[in-house]
Image (cartoon, helix red, strand yellow):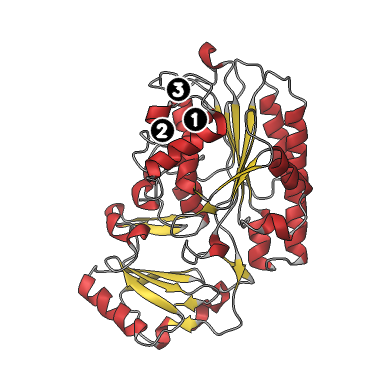
């Protein structure tokens, strides 16, 4: 089955697209829903960063168990490469691979404009020119619906001249319960101003996975905090008037796993690093040549591959085609990708990048896979599906909102499954 057909099937299977397609406007909602949308459903897209596909069976989470029992759960959610937070979150809301939407990492250079994107840099995160594609909140706003975001990659930026009606700068100190309280307040607004698409993000589990490891006390406390917040959200949805249709879509950007008890591979012990700008991530090192030279990059890759038995060096041309390195100039010229559970660093001074738990290994590694769950009207309780690719979520949300019809699913992006 082709990616396009599979994406359409997913939309139809979950909701049957009971709401008719609405013509798209050429501007934002202005904070007011068009009258034709007043009876349309609400979709809340929730991300629990780093929540691996098999965690529901491994750790007690009453609220998530309830969501599964009352809705559907896919076997797993397949991420894009690189399996990092920013590329995957933006793929979820655009339906595009990083090669297409341009957010190719958590940090990367834009050589054309002599600048860098860094997740810790508020200016670059809020610079809409870094972001390609059309995020869901823009599509929703252009259709005359109000959109809201309590954190999501890209929601702080002016992308194509637009932002969601409601958005807030990322602040990890904001308690999970406070985030849910704001979502419930939005749901309680009158039909004229009630957001129809809402994003909600929790980073606590990913943080603890890095700092203290999968299954640690800190990990369990973070998961309990998120689960309590989700219980409050489910309870709040359940007391809404019956005629208000609300879909809760729970996803994660990637999984997590520990490192093996082996010393990292150190690149400076094998090759000269002069002329390279390097970003260390633990499972991978990304390298940009100061003066791009494919032949020189190939020689460096070959030198590393002659000695490295726990990973592989790739050039843009030799990397797996699904990664898309050859299709976007922002991607690194060289990728040093460790095998699952193994680590690589550029220099000995970067050994601190190897943490208790991590992500960033290849997307086919099972521990990198996330979750996909949906609860709402018309969804058979306790139902399940095969794996879903995170680039399919975009079309699903538009379908649940009644903003695409069966024949057009996927056409808004021109792409699914990360190609």
Residue drawn at the location 45% of the way across and 45% of the way down? 391
Judging by the rendered image, the residue that carries numbered circle 1 is 399
Of 282 and 371, nearer the camera is 371
Q: Earlier in the sequence, mark 2 or mark 1?
A: 1
Residue drawn at the location 77% of the way across and 41% of the way down? 231
Secondary structure at numbered mark 1:
helix
Q: Nearer the viewer, mark 1 or mark 3?
A: 1
Instruction: State whether residue 415 is above or below residue 287.
Output: above
For marks 3 and 2, give the CA distance: 16 Å
Q: Are marks 2 and 1 in contact (CB under 8 Å)?
A: yes
Q: Local crowd at mark 1 within 10 Å, few (<14), some, or many (≥20)?
A: many
Q: Position of residue 114 (x, y in %)?
A: 31, 56
* 355 horizontally vs 325: left or right: right
Q: Nearer the viewer, mark 3 or mark 2?
A: 2
Q: Is residue 169 visible?
A: yes
Of 223 and 156, nearer the camera is 223
* 347 horizontally vs 384: left or right: left
Q: Position of residue 138 (x, y in %)?
A: 45, 31
Judging by the rendered image, the residue that carries numbered circle 2 is 409
Give the label on residue 143, or none: 3
Secondary structure at numbered mark 3:
loop
For marks 2 and 1, give the CA distance: 8 Å
Give the label on residue 180, or none: none
């Amino acid at each position: 089955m082709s990616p396009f057909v599979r994406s359409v099937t997913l939309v139809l299977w979950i909701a049957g697209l009971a709401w008719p397609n609405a013509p798209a406007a050429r501007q934002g909602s202005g904070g007011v829903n068009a009258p034709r949308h007043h009876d349309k459903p609400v979709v809340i897209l929730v991300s629990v960063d780093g929540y691996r596909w098999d965690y529901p069976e491994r750790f007690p989470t009453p609220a998530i168990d309830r969501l599964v029992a009352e809705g559907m759960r896919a076997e797993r959610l397949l991420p894009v490469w690189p399996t990092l937070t920013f590329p995957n979150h933006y793929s979820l809301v655009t339906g595009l691979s990083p090669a297409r939407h341009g957010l190719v990492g958590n940090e990367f250079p834009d050589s054309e404009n002599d600048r860098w994107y860094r997740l810790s840099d508020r200016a670059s995160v809020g610079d809409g020119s870094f972001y390609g594609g059309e995020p869901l909140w823009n599509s929703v706003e252009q259709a005359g619906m109000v959109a809201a975001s309590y954190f999501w990659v890209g929601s702080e930026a002016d992308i194509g001249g637009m932002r969601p009606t409601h958005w807030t700068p990322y602040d990890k100190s904001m308690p999970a319960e406070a985030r849910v309280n704001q979502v419930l307040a939005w749901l309680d607004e009158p039909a004229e101003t009630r957001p129809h698409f809402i994003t909600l993000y929790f980073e606590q589990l990913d943080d603890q996975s890095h700092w203290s490891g999968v299954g640690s006390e800190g990990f369990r406390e973070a998961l309990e905090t998120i689960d309590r917040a989700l219980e409050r959200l489910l309870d709040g949805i359940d007391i809404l008037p019956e005629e208000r249709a609300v879909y809760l879509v729970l996803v994660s950007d990637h999984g997590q796993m520990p490192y093996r008890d082996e010393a990292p591979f150190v690149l400076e012990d094998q090759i000269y690093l002069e002329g390279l700008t390097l970003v260390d991530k633990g499972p991978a090192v990304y390298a940009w040549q100061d003066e791009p030279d494919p032949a020189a990059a190939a020689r460096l890759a070959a030198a590393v591959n002659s000695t490295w038995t726990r990973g592989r060096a790739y050039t843009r041309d030799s990397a797996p085609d699904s990664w898309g390195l050859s299709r976007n100039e922002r991607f690194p010229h060289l990728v040093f990708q460790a095998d699952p559970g193994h680590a690589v660093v550029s220099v000995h001074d970067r050994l601190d990048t190897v943490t208790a738990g991590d992500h960033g290994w290849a997307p086919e590694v099972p521990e990198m896979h996330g979750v996909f769950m949906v609860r709402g009207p018309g969804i058979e309780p306790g139902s399940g599906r095969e794996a879903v690719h995170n680039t399919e979520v975009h079309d699903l949300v538009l379908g649940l909102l009644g903003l695409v019809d069966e024949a057009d699913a996927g056409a808004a992006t021109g792409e699914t499954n990360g190609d």
